[in-house]
Amino acid sequence: MGDHEHAHDHEHEHVEDEQEFEREARRQLALARIRQYGDSVLRMKARDVETFDDDLERLVERMTALMHEASGVGLAATQVGVLRRLFVFVEDGEDRVIVNPVITRSSGEIELDDEGCLSLRDVLVPVERPTNVTIEGVDAKGEPVKLELEPPSSRVVQHELDHLDGVLIIDRTDEQSRRAALATLRPQPVLGAR
C-alpha cells in the first residue's frame, strides 16, 4: 500500500469519527428535549386523545424524529411533556404510532430482560413482562390498529404504555436493581468532601 492510499484511508477514518461525533451530538440534543427522571410529568397519567387533527400528526412526526435522533426504539407523549395517550415505536424497521393503546391479550409466558429508558439515562434494570401481547388502538388519523407482537416489540409497547400511566421501569424491577438505579439517577454527595 502506497503512502497516497494510506493517507486516503486515514482521511476515511477521520470522516467516520466526525460522523460518529455528529450522531452523538444529535443524540445528546435530542435527549435534552426528552423529559428526564425527576420531572413530575413522567408520573402523571395521560388522557385519551379525542381530536385527530394536524396538531396530532405534527406531534407524531416530532416524536418519531426525536426517537430516532435519541437512538431510541420507542417514545411516549408524556416523555415530551404531552399528557395524551399515544406513543411511537419501531417495529421491524418500520415507524409506528398507536393512539389510545390498550393491551387486549397477553401471553401467560413471562420473560425477564434488561430495559433502558430515554428518560432514565444510563439506567438498565431487569423487568419481567409477558412475552407476547396484542395491542389495539388507532393511528394518527383515527383508523383502527391491531398488532400481535412478540419480543422485542412486545416489550417496547408495554414499556411505552406504562409511561402513559406514569409507571417507570424502576417501579417494575427488583429492590436491589431499583436502589442501584436510584443511586445512578441521584448522585449522592461524596462523604467527607468539602
Image (spheres, rainbow, N blue to C red):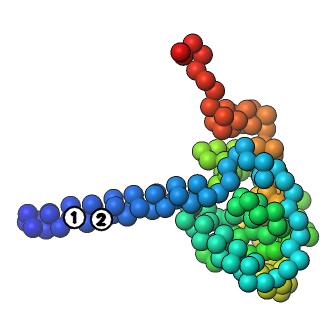
Packing grade of label 2 (10 A; few <14, some 14-19, many >=20) is: few
Pointer 1 residue: 11
- Front residue (pair 120, 111): 120
How many numbered marks does the figure carry? Answer: 2
- Seen at 86% across and 73% down, the residue is 49
Res 102 quadrant in image: bottom right
Pointer 2 residue: 15
**How far across and down, in percent of the image, does residue 45 sit?**
87, 57
- Front residue (pair 98, 114): 98
- Up the image or down, 139 lies above or below 150; here it is below
Instruction: Name the secondary structure under disc 1.
Output: helix
- Separation of residues labelled 2 and 1 (CA atoms): 6 Å
**How far across and down, in percent of the image, does residue 52 sit?**
82, 82
- Up the image or down, 149 lies above or below 146; here it is above
- Seen at 81% across and 44% down, the residue is 171
**How far across and down, in percent of the image, does residue 9 sit?**
21, 65
Going by the picture, which residue comes out furthest to the front?
55
Mark number, residue 92: none
